[in-house]
Amino acid sequence: MADIEFDIDGRIARLRLNRPEGLNAITPEMDILLHDAWTRINDDPGIWAVILSAAGERAFSIGADVSQGIERDGRMALGGGITGIGGPHLECRKPIVAAVQGYCVGGGFELAMCADLIVATETAQFGLPETKVGIIGECGVVHRAIRQLPHRIALQMILTGERISAQQAMQYGLVNEVVPPDELDAAAQKWADKLVAASPLAVQAAKAAVTARAGHPLDVALATRFEEIERYASTEDKREGERAAAERRKPVWSGR
């Protein structure tokens, strides 16, 4: 079976790490497949949302497979990050729901943080263990952590290698929902269904606007013109939303 599984179910793409015997550690070949999958997702207008998951019960992903020789000179050395989306060369325009179980550490943690929404099992654990093994995690994981977690919690994880539980991750605003292990797939599907119920063009424009100015002061963000939002104003989806509101019915989105 492929180490990366990809299929499309209606408007939802499903991307799955499938190397449970290796705790879904990401090899260079998997890195390439992930990059290709994100590119396909970005380029396919029929895909409106993504569910990112992993096989097995023990781990979502423990990050880079260091047995494959991808750690050099004390640094993680995969080109563009070990997630296919972690590098500056690619950002996914479509909304992503990550379904996380077991260990979610290192580059696996980065992969989860690339998602827009995270659902986790009660037994999930998130961590940045690099310093414990003498590695500097610089593929993007520390930069995402310091932006997505409270400052000192992120530093606690980065500097000590300590893991946090799913319940703590939800408390810190990293996770949207914590569920029993047997409800993980259904919970991820529920969130993906909510995403595809909205106009895909509106969702993508909103995500682009948030991402583009997330690190800027409020006055700069407010004064910025967003091309994606301006383009959306002339779309069929925008007109359909207005018609549906006037006619008091559910809109039927076309993605155009």
Image (tube, rainbow, N blue to C red):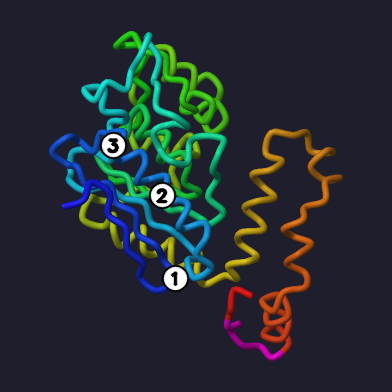
CB under 8 Å between discs 2 and 3: no
Stretch in magenta: 247-252
Q: CA distance from mark 2 to mark 1?
A: 19 Å
In this view, 12 is above or below 247? above
Quadrant the C terminus occupies? bottom right
Q: Which residue is mark 3?
A: 61
Q: Is residue 249 rendered to the left or right of residue 233?
A: left
Instruction: Name the residue: 68% across, 82% down.
Output: 240
- Counting other residues with Cα less than 10 Å from the Cα at mark 3, is it few (<14), some (14-19), or many (20 or more)? many
Q: Which residue is mark 2?
A: 36
Instruction: Name the residue: 35% across, 17% down.
Output: 130
Q: Secondary structure at mark 3?
A: strand
Q: Secondary structure at mark 1?
A: loop
Q: Amino acid at mark 3?
A: Ser
Q: Secondary structure at mark 2?
A: helix
Q: Amino acid at mark 1?
A: Arg
In this view, 145 is above or below 226? above
Residue 63, image x, y percentages: 32, 30
The numbered mark, 2 or 1, whose residue comes first in the sequence reads: 1
Residue 224, image x, y percentages: 83, 46
Q: Amino acid at mark 2?
A: Asp
Residue 69, image x, y percentages: 27, 21
Q: Which residue is mark 1?
A: 11
Task: For marks 2 and 1, give the one nearer the viewer.
Answer: 2
Residue 132, image x, y percentages: 31, 11
